[in-house]
Amino acid sequence: MEEITTRIPFYDLIRDFLVTDSVKNLFLIRHGETYFNLEDRIGGDSSLTPKGLRQAQALAQYFKSKSIPFIYTSKKKRTIETAEPIRDLQPNCSIIPLEEFNEIDSGICECMSYEEIRTQMPEVYYARKRDKYNYVYPCGEGYATMKERVDRGIKKALFLSGRAENIMIVGHRAVNRMILSHFLYRRTEDVPYIYIPQDKFYHIVATQYKKLFQLGPYE
Ligand code: F6P
């Protein structure tokens, strides 16, 4: 397990005390491989590939010895399909899809590949490259404009989880970067480059007494 430890700024203590006092462990997962991932396409509502389904089964085996009463997903098929096998091996587990955890809306670029964007809309491609955090896709979102809704999703999930000790969020690449940066301080310009692999998961502990970030494999 790779461990990231950090100094806890005072304002973080206040924030973590307010929002994660009863939830002790947050397992942050990215959905398994999709057909769109194979073509490097963004957005859309693609399903998992056979490899993605195997990743979901492996996650289910890994987490079956831990009690996960709540799994929060986005409204997209790929996150729900990843969560279902995990739920099926738990004695008591609900999947709660929240639109706040939907992937960044790439507006006029939805369903395009990065290469198509570069060749057909170079102004979009290069403007985003220059300032990825603040760039907003035409008719869509940017990292900066997603912040409010992702923070709302985290608060909603923690509230709905009541006194549960362990919860899981199955999200997407950009959304998971924003969730991580809610708990772990990062300069905004670095947030869109945080590593969010599909074969590992983040374990986050952000209570008043302990702050821990681990990135580890599940198989
Ligand atoms: O896996 C693809 C994806 O989730 C897209 O749907 C999304 O637009 C993208 O990743 C976000 O990553 P980046 O901000 O690095 O383009």
Image: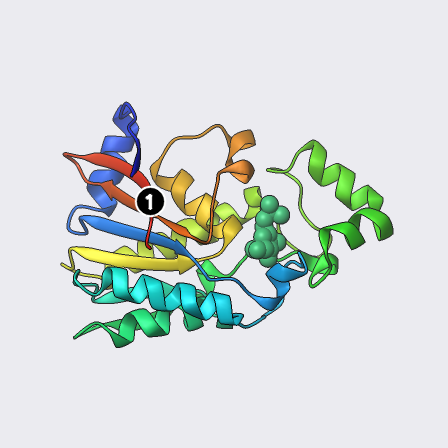
Position of residue 14 relative to residue 27, above or below, is above
Q: Quadrant of residue 144?
A: top right
* Of residues 23 and 86, the one drawn nearer to the viewer in this rendering: 86
| Residue in the picture at 49% in, 56% down | 172
Residue depicted at x 45% and y 66%: 79
Tally of numbered tags: 1
| Left or right of residue 180: residue 161 | left
The amino acid marked with disc number 1 is Gly
Left or right: 201, with 117 as reference point: left
Is the residue at mark 1 in contact range of ligand 1, meaning its CB lies under 8 Å from it?
no
**Outermost residue toward the right?**
120
Q: Mark 1 points at which residue?
A: 216
Q: Can residue 191 be seen in this view?
A: yes
Q: Where is residue 186 in the image (x, y as percent from the top left)?
A: 44, 30
Residue 201: x, y in percent?
36, 50
Q: In this view, does 147 lie to the left or right of 29?
A: right
Q: Position of residue 31 (x, y in %)?
A: 45, 61
x, y percent for residue 109: 73, 57
Residue 43: tell me if it is visible: no
Dot 1 surroundings within 10 Å: few (below 14), some, or many (20 or more)? some
| Residue ID at (63%, 61%) | 38
Quadrant (top left/top right/bottom left/bottom right) for the N terminus: top left
Residue drawn where x is 13% and y is 58% of the image: 163
Helix, strand or loop status at disc 1 = strand
**Structure colour scheme:** rainbow
Query: 170 or 88: nearer the eye?
Result: 88
